[in-house]
Image: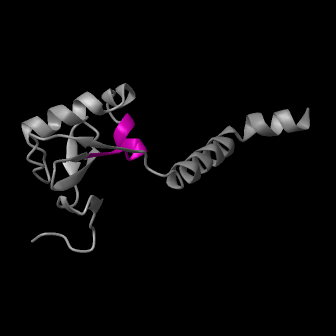
């Protein structure tokens, strides 16, 4: 009985501990990555994708991310590629997309991250 009384009196402390635990779990969570999705007509504009690229990303993204904040809180990333470059777009809170880096050139069938085009 004493434990239950203690928990009732210190509910704010328990709430704070639960919040800290949730923060710790989320901070160690690896962002879900999706793709690469081929797109021959995409221009891979950054930081905001062109219309064709955005439509391709919307077609391929998991349905769960259509809800506001879900993909952004999870840190979801979607990669789309043309024949020569790939770009990684991050979901935003308003279910939009933004690229934090320039498109990565593809050489010999692999991503060459050491020599980005200028």
Between 39 and 72, which is closer to the camera in this rendering?
39
Taking the image as shown, residue 47 lies to the left or right of residue 60, namely: left
Q: Quadrant of the N terminus?
A: top right
Image-quadrant location for residue 108: bottom left
Q: Residue at position x 16%, y 32% from top?
A: 55
> How many circles with numbers are drawn on the protein?
0
Q: Which residues are magenta?
A: 70-79
Which residue is the extreme one toward the bottom? Answer: 114
How is the rendered protein coloured?
one colour
> In the rendering, at what x and y percent does residue 37 appear?
27, 41
Between 3 and 26, which is closer to the camera in this rendering?
26
* 113 is higher (above) or lower (below) than 19: below
Is residue 64 magenta-colored? no
Which residue is the extreme one toward the front? Answer: 108
Q: Quadrant of the C terminus?
A: bottom left
Q: Residue at position x 8%, y 39% from top?
A: 41
* 115 is higher (above) or lower (below) than 51: below
Image-quadrant location for residue 15: top right
Q: Residue at position x 28%, y 61% from top?
A: 111
Taking the image as shown, residue 3 lies to the left or right of residue 64, namely: right
> In the rendering, at what x and y percent does residue 107 appear?
22, 64
Q: Residue at position x 90%, y 37% from top?
A: 2
Between 93 and 112, which is closer to the camera in this rendering?
112
Taking the image as shown, residue 8 lies to the left or right of residue 72, namely: right
> In the rendering, at what x and y percent does residue 25 appear?
58, 49
Which residue is the extreme one toward the right? Answer: 1
Is residue 76 magenta-colored? yes
* 91 is higher (above) or lower (below) than 58: below
Image-quadrant location for residue 60: top left
């Amino acid at each position: 009985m004493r434990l239950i009384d203690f928990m009732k009196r210190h509910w704010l402390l328990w709430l704070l501990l639960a919040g800290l635990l949730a923060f710790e779990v989320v901070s160690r969570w690896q962002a879900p990555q999706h793709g690469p999705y081929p797109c021959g007509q995409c221009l891979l504009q950054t930081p905001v994708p062109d219309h064709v690229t955005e439509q391709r990303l919307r077609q391929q993204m998991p349905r769960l991310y259509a809800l506001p904040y879900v993909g952004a809180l999870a840190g979801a990333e979607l990669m789309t590629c043309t024949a020569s470059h790939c770009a990684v777009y991050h979901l935003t809170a308003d279910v939009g997309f933004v690229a934090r880096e320039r498109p990565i050139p593809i050489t010999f069938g692999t991503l060459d991250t050491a020599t980005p085009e200028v």
